[in-house]
Image (cartoon, helix red, strand yellow):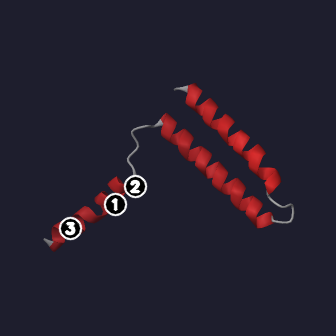
Amino acid sequence: MRMVPLFFSTVIVIFMFLFQWPKINQNQKKEKAAFITLTLLGWLLINFLFIFPNTPGPTEFIDFMYKPLGRLLE
């Protein structure tokens, strides 16, 4: 497993968090929760793609779902 991309993605997310967190008003709890959630999901997704680079994308999923329907309509 390549550790360098995982390390740099983590460093980038930490710097992004440290730069953006103070700009969010202290009373905006929903915005802070959304920021944490989206940042965490993005970090997990990019690390998943670093570990498994050949993972099929969303277009392959759409093709898989609708290919039988396309054959029925022909």
What kind of residue is marked 3? Gly
Q: Is residue 15 left or right of residue 62?
A: right
Earlier in the chain: of badge 3 and badge 1, it is 1
Outermost residue to the left = 74
| Residues at discs 2 and 3 in contact (Cβ within 8 Å) | no
Question: Looking at the image, which residue is at 74% across and 63% down?
Answer: 31
Of residues 17 and 72, the one drawn nearer to the viewer in this rendering: 17
Question: Looking at the image, which residue is at 30% across and 58% down?
Answer: 64
Residue 15 at x, y percent in the picture: 72, 40
What kind of residue is marked 1? Ile
User: Which residue is under mark 3?
Assistant: 70
Secondary structure under the numbered disc 2 in the rendered image:
helix
Residue 53 at x, y percent in the picture: 43, 37
Quarter holding residue 55: top left
Numbered badge on residue 47: none
User: Which residue is under mark 2?
Assistant: 58
Q: Callout 1 environment at 10 Å: few (<14), some (14 to 19), or many (20+)? A: few
User: Which residue is under mark 1?
Assistant: 62
Secondary structure under the numbered disc 3 in the rendered image:
helix
Q: Is residue 54 left or right of residue 2?
A: left
| Residues at discs 3 and 1 in contact (Cβ within 8 Å) | no
Earlier in the chain: of badge 2 and badge 3, it is 2
